Image (tube, coloured by chain):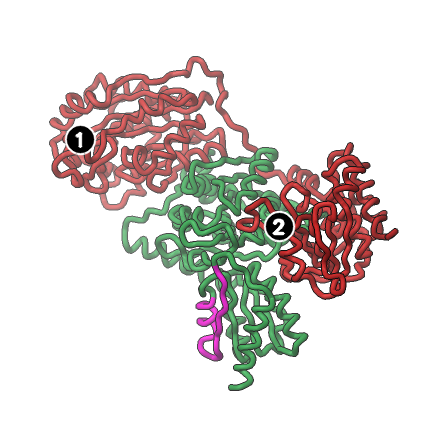
Chain colours: A red, B green
């Protein structure tokens, strides 16, 4: 009588179970979990999947799935089995992942995880045991509790206008394009069980063939939670629950899927490959060519968004990096960015840099009017202020500061595009500070400007800015 | 060594890749999003996993899944998102799963703002989720450390089978600096003794944090506690700057330590004997070194982007030997060197008078 033999996908003795009865389950008489476990175990064995199966137990009565299933086991946080299962499958696409969940777990606290795993078409199998009650927790209302059904939290019965209606997960998930197979079965009578067994095995086969997401909802009895004897519970399941939770296949694309169509790619760590990849990230400026900074530069660049303020800071930073200096670049972000203004702080130093914020610049670049008013007072005595005189009116305090007023935007127009006004300014800055030779800057720009067609224009812009200061 | 000029947030992903991290799960949030952007670009390109999860909760539970397979994995977020991950972190700690979680701290409470704060210190170092557990917490203060300490976090997480957290702030995340790009790690630990990989050799393993029997759960907690004591004994990291002869020891971490570093030099120019003690591990906290410095210094000052959190650990370490002062800015306001210098002066004047 093969029917009564325990599947080899079960442990023969439940050593992980606490208490003395190591060969009996912890489930109540008449509970559907035992039946469902058995059908899953038999399907695992028949399909020869057991040793590569990872069974994810939920929170609820089936939290102890790992007592019974002789395969890899995870216990997941309440509602998160589909997320945990997603990660397991993505990290080993050859694993067979079973996410076994009850109604509170899957359809209340874990609704988001359920829907999104289905929507991504994760190549996992979800078994959803719907018994219309929170069993383990003590008989509270589940998302699938029936209208009129009494529970610990609906003592007068579930009411539509207070508690909402029972959720039909199979129907909901079937509206998504990705899932391959969605069926609702029941275990109310032997005919149901035959169909349930077939659905469970089919769902696992779909996963094993890499054909995508499979979901089987199993309407199941909870005599203890329903406060009924097992026979009445079974009758209520068949006569009442199935009216709200009709059985059937809601989606089946399994015949239209190629094998491994939903199998994702994963490669374990490969040092050689990672090293090659990381090496490709290195800066285009190439080898460090140490230069001498006459003095540390603590720069503030300020203007409107779109003027290339941040890029200007980045260009100077990378020139400094190539020169072997300590460099920091920090963009104003958050509230300061509102209103379309942009600014960044750049430090170039021969010493380790403390604060990356520049409160008192020794070089201030100003490319719009408000920035002049905002930042001029912060410049240290004897510092340099460079402003684009095409767009900024007014003169800085030339007694206190070394002022460079350069019509950068006009010069940029002459070079060919207003977009290189920032590089004109860069040329002026380098000339005013003698921080680097123009040749060093130009060769750096050639290396770091990605769009090769723009290089010559940028070099000319730099040179025009540099010469403007040097020939003044 | 190959160098690149990069954002702190990007450097985290470089460190993660070099450390052998193979799966990134995350949800977008400012000012941590660049980490997810970099992960989305680089993880699939290297045959790894990137999933933009449906929620922070899902992201940390995906981490739980990959971590339980013994594969290096991470997630990153900013304060409100980090709060959402607490249950999952507690599960990871309970099931003894190694993983790395990054918190680019922003202004709170509630939605707060996206400016830098350090007000998640309690949450990170005292255990934000339920139960007796600790996060190993590392606080980088620049782009290079964002990379290097991420690698270190993976190493420590694996060594102790416990989640490790990178605590940084918006400035450290957004700032660009020169980073020496590391080589990939040589060896990854073999976790087949406990991991569930979906392969036959690990099919007898179980990833779980449920322990029904109170005595068994007490034993489990005591085992975790012994592990935490070992971490406290072996893994403290800190940096001292001009502390040898200092009257005033300033304790600061993350971006604040950078500002204090500059201010210490300014103070020294004025003749103030000030030094900086920078915790690099926030948990385990450098209690012993602070206790030692309390024997020679006259006063301590904790400077934080909060209304006073780390200062409590400084007080515990100083243990009443000398006064412990506090200076904090919050809401995203970052103190400048001048106001810190004023504070140093106030304290050292008090020291001189007394």
Real-space Cα separation, disc 2 to disc 1, in angstroms: 65 Å
Q: Which numbered marker is on residue A30?
A: 1
Chain for disc number 1: A
Per the image, label 2 sits on a secondary structure element best described as strand
* Residue bounds of the magenta highlight: B311-330
Q: Position of residue B269 (x, y in %)?
A: 68, 75
Residue A214 lies, in percent from the top left, at 38, 24
Front one among A468 and A158: A468
Q: Residue B222, position in %: x, y? A: 37, 59
In the rendered image of this protein, does residue A163 appear above or below residue A443?
above
Horizontal side of residue B262 vs B130, given as left or right: right
Q: Residue A150 in the image: x percent, y percent?
A: 14, 35
Furthest toward the top, the residue is A255
Q: Residue at x 27, y 21 (%)?
A: A185
Q: Quadrant of residue A108?
A: top left
**Residue behind mark 2:** A331
Q: Are marks 2 and 1 in one subunit? A: yes
2 or 1: tag closer to the N-terminus: 1
- Against A156, residue B151 (above or below) is below
Q: Is-magenta flag for residue B312?
A: yes
The answer to which of A117 and A69 lies nearer the viewer is A117
Q: Residue at x 44, y 46 (%)?
A: B81
């Amino acid at each position: 009588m093969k029917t009564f033999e325990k599947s080899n996908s079960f442990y023969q003795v439940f050593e992980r179970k606490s208490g003395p009865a190591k060969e009996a389950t912890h489930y109540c008489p008449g509970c559907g979990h035992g039946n469902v476990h058995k059908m899953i175990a038999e399907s695992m064995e028949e399909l020869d999947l057991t040793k590569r199966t990872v069974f994810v137990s939920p929170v609820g009565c089936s939290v102890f799935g790992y007592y019974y299933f002789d395969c890899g086991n995870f216990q997941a946080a309440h509602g998160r089995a589909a997320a945990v299962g997603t990660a397991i499958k993505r990290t080993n696409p050859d694993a067979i992942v079973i996410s076994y969940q009850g109604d509170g777990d899957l359809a209340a606290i874990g609704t988001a995880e359920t829907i999104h795993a289905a929507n991504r078409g994760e190549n996992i199998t979800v078994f959803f045991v719907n018994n219309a009650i929170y069993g383990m927790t003590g008989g509270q209302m589940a998302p699938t509790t029936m209208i009129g059904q009494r529970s610990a939290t609906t003592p007068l019965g579930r009411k539509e206008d207070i508690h909402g209606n029972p959720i039909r997960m199979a129907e909901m998930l079937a509206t998504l394009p990705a899932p391959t197979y969605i069926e609702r079965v029941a275990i109310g009578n032997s005919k149901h069980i035959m169909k349930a067994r077939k659905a469970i095995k089919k769902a696992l086969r779909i996963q094993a063939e890499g054909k995508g997401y499979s979901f089987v909802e199993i309407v199941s009895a909870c005599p203890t939670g329903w406060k009924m004897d097992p026979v009445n519970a079974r009758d209520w399941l068949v006569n009442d629950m199935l009216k709200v939770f009709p059985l059937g296949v809601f989606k089946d694309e399994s015949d239209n899927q190629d094998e491994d169509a939903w199998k994702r790619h994963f490669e374990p760590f490969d040092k050689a490959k990672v090293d090659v990849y990381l090496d490709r990230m290195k800066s285009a400026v190439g080898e460090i060519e140490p230069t001498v900074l006459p003095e540390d530069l603590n720069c503030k660049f300020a203007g409107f968004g779109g003027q290339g303020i941040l890029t200007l800071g980045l260009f100077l930073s990378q020139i400094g990096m190539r020169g072997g200096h300590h460099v920091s670049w920090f963009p104003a972000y958050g509230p300061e960015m509102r209103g379309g203004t942009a600014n960044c702080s750049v430090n170039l130093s021969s010493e380790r840099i403390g604060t990356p914020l520049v409160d008192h610049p020794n070089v201030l670049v100003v490319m719009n009017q408000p920035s002049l008013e905002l930042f001029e007072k912060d410049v240290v005595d004897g510092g340099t202020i460079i402003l684009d005189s095409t767009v900024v009116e007014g003169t800085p305090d030339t007694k206190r500061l070394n002022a460079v007023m350069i019509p950068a935007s006009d010069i940029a127009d002459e070079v060919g595009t207003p977009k290189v006004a920032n590089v004109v300014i860069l040329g002026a800055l380098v000339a005013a500070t003698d921080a680097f030779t123009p040749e060093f800057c130009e060769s750096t720009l050639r290396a770091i400007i990605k769009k090769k067609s723009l290089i010559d224009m940028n070099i000319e812009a730099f040179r025009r800015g540099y010469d403007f200061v040097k020939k003044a | 060594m190959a160098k690149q000029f990069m954002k702190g947030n990007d450097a985290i992903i470089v460190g993660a890749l070099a450390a052998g991290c193979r799966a990134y799960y995350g949800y977008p949030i400012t000012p941590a999003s660049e980490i997810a952007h970099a992960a989305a670009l680089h993880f699939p390109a290297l045959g790894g996993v990137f999933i933009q999860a449906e929620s922070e909760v899902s992201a940390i539970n995906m981490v739980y899944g990959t971590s339980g397979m013994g594969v290096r994995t991470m997630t990153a977020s900013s304060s409100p998102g980090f709060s959402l991950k607490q249950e999952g972190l507690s599960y990871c700690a309970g099931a003894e799963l190694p993983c790395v979680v990054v918190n680019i701290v922003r202004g709170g409470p509630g939605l707060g703002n996206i400016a830098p704060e350090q007000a998640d210190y309690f949450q990170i170092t005292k255990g934000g989720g339920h139960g007796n557990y600790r996060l190993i917490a590392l606080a980088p203060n620049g782009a290079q450390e964002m990379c290097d300490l991420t690698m270190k976090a993976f190493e420590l997480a694996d060594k102790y089978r416990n989640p490790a957290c990178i605590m940084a702030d918006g400035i450290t995340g957004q700032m660009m600096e020169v980073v020496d790009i590391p080589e990939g790690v040589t060896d990854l630990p073999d976790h087949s003794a406990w991991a569930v990989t979906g392969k036959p050799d690990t099919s007898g393993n179980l990833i779980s944090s449920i322990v029904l029997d109170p005595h068994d759960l007490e034993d489990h907690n005591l085992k975790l506690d012994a592990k935490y004591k070992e971490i406290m004994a072996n893994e403290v990291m800190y940096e001292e700057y001009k502390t040898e002869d200092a009257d005033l020891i300033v304790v600061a971490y993350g971006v604040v330590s950078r500002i204090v570093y500059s201010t210490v030099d300014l103070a020294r120019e004025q003749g103030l004997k000030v030094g900086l003690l920078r915790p690099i591990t926030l948990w385990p906290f450098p209690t012993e070194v602070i206790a030692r410095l309390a024997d020679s210094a006259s006063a301590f000052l904790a400077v934080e982007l909060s209304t006073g959190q780390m200062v409590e650990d400084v007080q515990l370490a100083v243990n009443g030997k000398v006064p412990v002062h506090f200076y904090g800015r919050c809401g995203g306001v970052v103190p400048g060197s001048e106001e810190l210098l004023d504070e140093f002066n106030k304290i050292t004047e008090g020291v001189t008078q007394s």
